[in-house]
Image (spheres, rainbow, N blue to C red):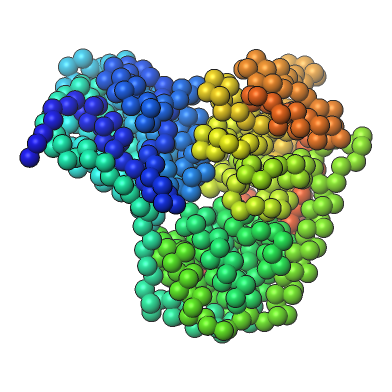
Amino acid sequence: MNTVRLTLSEALVRYLAAQKVEIDGCVESLFGCSFAIFGHGNVTCLGQQLKNIEEQIPTWRGQNEQSMAMAAVAYAKANKRRRIGIATTSIGPGATNMVTAAGIAHTNRLPLLMISGDTYLSRLPDPVLQQTEHFYNPSLTVNDSFKSVTRYWDRVVHPAQLLHTLPQALDTMLDPASCGPVFLGLPQDVQGMVFDYPEVFFAETVHRIRRPEPEEHALKHAADTLKQAKRPLIISGGGVHYSLACEELKELAEAHNIPVVETIAGRATLLQENPLNGGPIGVTGSDSANSLAREADVVLAIGTRLQDFTTGSWSVFRNPDLKIISINVARFDAIKHRSIPVIGDAKASLIKLNKLLRSWQGPDEWSRKTQVLADIWKNLCAGRSAIAEGETASYAQVVGAVNRLMAPGDSVLTAAGGLPAELNMNWQNKQLGKFDIEFGFSCMGYEIAGGWGAKIANPDNDVVVLVGDGSYMILNSDIYSSVLSGHKLIVVVCDNGGFAVINKLQNNTGNQSFNNLLEDCRRPGEEVPRVDFAKHAEAQGALSEKIGSMVEFDAAFGRAKAADRSYVIVVDVDPHKWSECDCWWQVGLPAVSRDKRTAEAVANFEEGRGFQRPGV
């Protein structure tokens, strides 16, 4: 066998560059981008090797390790998990900054490759700069903190180990059932060690995403159960996007007259104009979808992990005879709440299930009710988004304006705070996909970083980022990254004077406003200092403006569309004006109440708990 002598860093990068993926008949690099902040843990060996392959895997300079890993997550999501981003850091705080981003990828079942430096294997120079010493376990480093938020974790302590760990790491990210983040820790001295690698290890390899076939008996059980339904309902989750199964979802729903509702991750799997689209389900959903869920006797959940915001903490399903069928490529998700599991790829499963159902159709009365309820919800959204001169903007008005003005191919993206609920509740799907609410990990700060990653994935269309003032303050430096790298973003900053949605939760649970809105924060005087977000964005190289009201938004958005670089629009938003839907959500409340307001909130909460579905 022919071998080639390489350092660990040379071998690692050569292997990554050799990995390809077939997408729609075209072969592309599996790893489409790399993000790096170099330090003494990754610059001397790994950094040069990334430089050597920058035409194959371009490396972009981030401003913060957390945000560049978030950008890599959003890049993978925009590519429907078919291309992967890399994030590399030095040791110590550079590494631990990425733990939050790893949590996003892990929670949302998204691939991400993280490579961080580690302390010296020899321990001769210990303790080194940024090394946290564990008194009773010298092998423990800060990189061990990634174990709880990764699907695959390894510390490579010998260059030969790459022969084993890289194929395993790669398969973890490519397998639809195990898909999630991978972490590789590279001790600084090991990165430069050499080994005689088999040349075949670096042969170009073209990957194709697997489509695990469901078992026939499971499909037959699902079909037989659906045929007994009087009020069947499909819940479409993010797995429909990742399986590229939107067309198969539409075909099954229309062939068998089954209403469809969407999770947050499953938004834009079915166009809003489709009469079977009942709207978004759950706590941040629509009354139309939640009403359908309350009555449904058979729920077909496709590609969803049934998170509490989807299920209203398992209170949204109120039919005592309810049966849940779960199509999911991951066994862990398929068996939740005594579901009838169909373990397999969504596209493959829907095609076969469609055939097994033959000519069966759900009742016309049920589908007509879906259309009536959905129309009521759409009218409600139109009313909430209507703009009146002289009033402070609402989130719904911002969402409605962006929904109306976006061009085909453009994407919208947000995360955490009040915007996910407002975007989910009010958005009307005019195109499939192109929609990202990071609400699995609900991570503030993802918005601008994620927008940057989504733009790298979709360079020919605009990415519109909706971000609140609170999230902007947490992480905004990738406005500069987007300017530096030439990846234009349109960023809409909704300034409501603090963490307004958490203030709302405080008040709704009987608590007094405290430390969320700026006006309720401890400060030396009566004046409330405010950030000039337009000037701040301008200081990072973006074009920017603050509008006086939503009457000015259309013109500002037109200027943003025409701009040659990132453009930031700032608008003041009413901190007390919210879109609402009728859905219970479990929050922690005190068992003993000390005041009337809290007692009333607890009583209302306990009333809703009565509808909570037990886990068995």
x, y percent for residue 546: 78, 24
Q: Total label count? A: 0
Towards the viewer: 567 or 137: 567
Towards the viewer: 347 or 222: 347
**Left or right side of 373 for 357:** left
x, y percent for residue 588: 60, 50
**Left or right side of 158 for 333:** right
Towards the viewer: 348 or 512: 348
x, y percent for residue 356: 48, 80
Quadrant occupied by the N terminus: top left
Q: At 85% from the left edge and 28% from the top edge, which residue is drawn? A: 548
Q: Is residue 425 visible?
A: no
x, y percent for residue 208: 35, 52
Q: Residue furthest front?
A: 25
For residue 484, what is the image quadrant?
top right
Q: At 27% from the left edge and 20% from the top edge, which residue is drawn? A: 45
Q: At 24% from the left edge and 26% from the top edge, which residue is drawn? A: 9
Q: Is residue 68 visible?
A: yes
For residue 332, what is the image quadrant?
bottom left
Q: At 62% from the left edge and 30% from the top edge, which residue is drawn? A: 489
**Left or right side of 541 for 342:** left
* Relative to 4, residue 348 above or below: below
* Relative to 544, residue 407 above or below: below
